[in-house]
Amino acid sequence: MNTPLILITNDDGYQAAGIQALTRAVAPLGEIYVVAPDGARSGAAAAITSTTPVSYSPLTSDKTQSPNPLSSLTAGTQEGATVPSPYVEGLHLYSCTGTPVDCVKLALEQIVPRKPDLILSGINHGDNASVSIHYSGTMGAVLEGCMKDIPSIGISLYLQRGQRYEDHPVSEDTLAAAAALCRRVLEQGLPQDVCLNINLPIAHKFRGWQVCRQARGRWSAEWTDAHNPRGQRCFWLTGEFTDLEPEATDTDFAALRAGYCSIVPVTVDTTAYHATQHINTLL
Amino acid sequence: MNTPLILITNDDGYQAAGIQALTRAVAPLGEIYVVAPDGARSGAAAAITSTTPVSYSPLTSDKTQSPNPLSSLTAGTQEGATVPSPYVEGLHLYSCTGTPVDCVKLALEQIVPRKPDLILSGINHGDNASVSIHYSGTMGAVLEGCMKDIPSIGISLYLQRGQRYEDHPVSEDTLAAAAALCRRVLEQGLPQDVCLNINLPIAHKFRGWQVCRQARGRWSAEWTDAHNPRGQRCFWLTGEFTDLEPEATDTDFAALRAGYCSIVPVTVDTTAYHATQHINTLL
């Protein structure tokens, strides 16, 4: 196998700690292209940008690209100490003005030199388990990769509200396990029209994988009432999530509750085959 | 059964001809609330607005709402003749600054007096068959309704590029068939966690329904290169769709090609159950 080409994106923006950790973890597996939004796109789902044009900018010192200063992105100091570069050396890094799906579409047609062998999205700062997958920009990008016939994996960290990734970073052994899984997917591929939705619990130590189904769940109490400075009423999206199957043992949330990393194989084909007969009775 | 409450939204904006036609068609079935975006949200998928607040405005002369002039919305002239009001009398009409999913979430918590008996989305100006469902704001709203345990149906018109809804409006007998289906769904409901993705061909006469599966398909050649007035390169999303199963007879595109209206039952549960065993072999 030639050096694999891996495309990485997310919905938190290229500056996010999660995508930097993921990039470092999988950098030994191949040649890395990061094409990620220029800022937060949380909740972007599989949205595409249809009413405005989209553009991208190289951010690495890659010699094939116009030079952009990398120093502001990859160096920093903390309490006077030199900290490691958040991004690894030698990758190809681009920011994009569009959605996560735009990032994948633009990367495939305009940026990467050949079809990637793997697309990764994340590590999202917040879970995408249960029905939250439907709103997830992280998983929107993954579905896009899958629809382009490329093995694609989304990885998200199950943070509670108010918890920051930086305070609960994914442990090194969990990152190593994720990288090992990526290596096996590079070797063996994934079934046609199937991608992976991985959610990680906050844990100091990797406990193992569990292949799960998507939990039934529901968001409620979703709006916080506010007023803008002109006195006009407006609403901020928030919400409480309820796991509708708290006793189940085979769902993504059950795995997370037990401290395991959940893997849900996700289908591009949304047909509810079991319902076909019932729908025919309505006609 | 009390008078059913029907919530209608779309992703083309409340001014669109498609949502007005749908509203007129189902108005006899119950009390109608239209809560739709204030402009185009094509390709919004199930995106939610997480970084800015969202607001809504009443647009009807509903006496319970602050008065807003309706005249500019519901009257018009064409070649000197008086045309029917595009929206029916007596409905509750609101515009919303958010996405289609925001419209549903905001309507359910802030606008409608009780849980709707049915949520409709459309009629979209363009199809949402095959994998286009993943990008569809029309179907994002439908999935949201389904996740809130409300029977939900999306309806889209299969226009070719450059064709306008106004030049190819859905025929009256097709609208009547759609309304009859909505009536049966009001009476009998839909299976748990299943909603409907309906696509209509351009046709002068309703030929019938076909319950289908989602066709395998692929978008390619998705970007048109351009420059903004400052000379910077940018990209407009476009694309060519390929039906990967042109010989199939049981897909949504097969039904549309044959002149039938396709109904795909769509599942909220995205788990690829058939792939679970294979994924376990990767661990």
Image (cartoon, coloured by chain):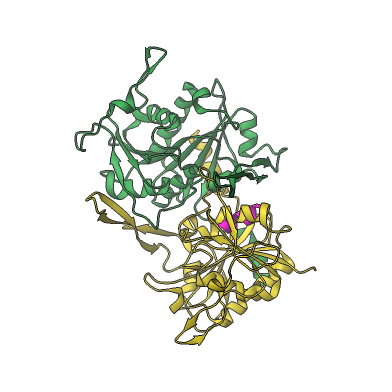
Chain colours: A yellow, B green
Q: Tell me, yes or no, if residue B185 can be seen here.
A: yes
Count of marks overlaid on the render: 0
Q: Residue B235: give x, y in percent of width and height.
A: 60, 47
- Comparing B182 with B59, the one in front is B59
The stretch of residues the image draws in magenta is: A141-148
Q: Is residue B9 magenta?
A: no
Quadrant in which residue B5 is drawn = top left
Q: Is residue B160 left or right of residue B122?
A: right
Work out which residue is located at the far top of the displayed protein and give it.
B80
- Comparing B22 with A27, the one in front is A27
Q: Residue B268: give x, y in percent of width and height.
A: 49, 52
Q: Is residue A59 left or right of residue B8?
A: right
Say which quadrant the N terminus of chain B sits in: top left
Q: Who's the residue at 41% across and 48% down the image?
A: B101
Q: Tell me, yes or no, if residue B88 can be seen here.
A: no
- Comparing A69 with B55, the one in front is A69
Quadrant in which residue B16 is drawn = top left
Work out which residue is located at the far right of the displayed protein and give it.
A1
In the picture shown, does residue B227 fall above or below A107? above
Q: Residue B92: give x, y in percent of width and height.
A: 29, 35
Quadrant in which residue B221 is drawn = top right
Provide the major secondary structure of the magenta segment.
Answer: helix
Q: Residue A148: give x, y in percent of width and height.
A: 67, 53
In the picture shown, does residue A140 fall above or below B71? below
Q: Who's the residue at 26% across and 56% down the image?
A: A226
Say which quadrant the C terminus of chain B sits in: bottom right
